[in-house]
Image: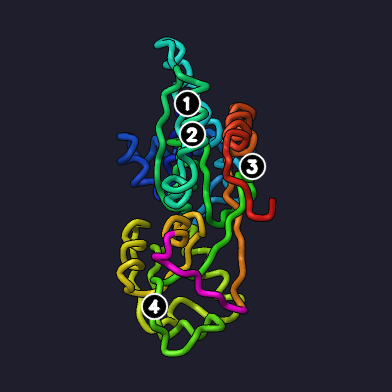
């Protein structure tokens, strides 16, 4: 069990405000200050500094925050494990991004559940940014993401690689046949919300060519993959998606890939969990088994 003063420290880290932390913890502000002073004396370092009224973490404070947050998450996981042992059942909680969860994960997960019939599973959907936040808060054990993420602090396992392609409705009328990305700028772009892996990948690729999503004449921002597909099928614009998300529609001739000379890319789907977690080995074993049970293979295999 974490020392109560560590809980105070982590709360101040979240708010970077002693008053708000005191309100959250139902403590007086002097009590919060006393807890922080105790930890600073114990570790012999300054944990917070001030710039006027602004409070910020020192480098030592950042290191302590990272270490204690992992311990806090492990403690939450340990509680769930012990509760499961008492009830004689195991619970696995993990997060997936939309494309993976809706179009790729079902088959290997079915096989995994058949091999582990006594396991309870909680699957959380979210964009890459939301799942990284859930990992930091300890609400999920690991995540399977399609977007970019900071590698420091995480252990990873590649699940697969998928082509990322521009698509439109079959028979879509272009003012002129598109050959490069800029030829699509006169089209309406159907795009996911900020924070999603799909959008992040597109934005990074556009940036390589010194473009942004703002170069498209119009756009529709959607937080749901199914809605984007329906808009594509209704010939309401163009989009950039993983091939796996539109495989059926491409095979049935409802959608078409837009072939561009300056846009060919693939991206990894990646399992990730907190580095140095007490349960890191357990997560690695689970993720490796899900990989082995998957018939989804990278295009280059």
Tell whether label 2 touches label 1 (CB within 8 Å): yes
* Residue 32 lies within the magenta run: no
Q: Specify the label residue 157 is tagged with.
A: 3
Ranked by sequence position, the earlier of labels 3 and 4 is 3
Characterize the local packing of mark 4: few (<14), some (14-19) or many (20 or more) Cα atoms within 10 angstroms: some
The secondary element bearing badge 4 is classed as: loop
Tell which of 171 and 297 is nearer to you: 171
As drawn, the label of residue 102 is none
| Between discs 4 and 2, the one toward the N terminus | 2
Report the disc number at residue 113.
1
The residue positioned 42% from the left and 28% from the top of the image is 121
Q: Is 257 one of the magenta-colored residues?
A: yes
Badge nearest the viewer, 3 or 4: 4
Separation of marks 1 and 3 at Cα, in angstroms = 20 Å
Residue 12: give x, y in percent of width and height: 43, 44
Residue at 60 percent across and 27 percent down: it is 282
Q: Quadrant of residue 44?
A: top right
Residue 57, horizontal then vertical, whole percent: 54, 51
Say whether marks 1 and 3 touch (CB < 8 Å). no
3D distance between C-alphas at marks 4 and 2 = 36 Å
| Camera-side residue of 182 and 36 | 182
Q: What residue sits 38% from the left and 39% below the top?
A: 30
Among the two numbered marks 2 and 3 on one chain, the one whose residue lies closer to the N terminus: 2
Q: Which residues are magenta?
A: 252-261
Query: Which residue carries the number 2 mark?
Result: 109
Q: At numbered mark 1, what does the secondary structure look like: helix, strand or loop? A: helix
Q: Which mark is residue 172?
A: 4
């Amino acid at each position: 069990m974490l020392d109560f003063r560590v809980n105070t420290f982590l709360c101040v880290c979240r708010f970077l405000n002693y008053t708000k932390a005191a309100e959250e913890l139902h403590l007086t502000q002097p009590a919060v200050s006393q807890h922080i002073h105790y930890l600073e004396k114990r570790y012999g370092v300054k944990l917070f500094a001030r710039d006027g009224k602004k409070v910020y973490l020192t480098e030592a404070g950042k290191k302590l925050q990272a270490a204690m947050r992992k311990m806090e998450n492990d403690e939450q996981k340990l509680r769930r494990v012990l509760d499961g042992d008492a009830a004689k059942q195991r619970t696995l909680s993990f997060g997936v991004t939309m494309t993976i969860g809706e179009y790729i994960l079902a088959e290997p997960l079915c096989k995994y559940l058949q091999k582990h019939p006594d396991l309870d599973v909680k699957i959380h959907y979210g964009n890459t940014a939301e799942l990284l936040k859930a990992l930091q808060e300890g609400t999920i054990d690991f995540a399977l993401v399609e977007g970019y993420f900071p590698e420091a602090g995480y252990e990873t396992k590649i699940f697969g690689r998928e082509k990322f392609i521009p698509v439109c409705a079959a028979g879509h009328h272009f003012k002129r046949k598109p050959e490069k990305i800029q030829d699509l700028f006169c089209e309406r772009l159907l795009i996911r919300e900020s924070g999603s892996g799909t959008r992040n990948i597109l934005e990074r690729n556009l940036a390589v060519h010194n473009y942004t999503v703002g170069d498209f004449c119009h756009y529709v921002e959607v937080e749901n993959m199914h809605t984007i597909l329906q808009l594509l099928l209704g010939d309401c614009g163009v989009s950039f998606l993983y091939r796996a998300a539109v495989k059926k529609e491409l095979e049935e001739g409802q959608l078409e890939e837009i072939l561009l000379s300056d846009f060919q890319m693939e991206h990894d789907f990646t399992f990730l969990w907190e580095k140095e977690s007490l349960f890191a080995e357990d997560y690695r074993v689970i993720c490796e088994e899900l990989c082995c049970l998957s018939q989804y293979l990278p295009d280059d295999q």
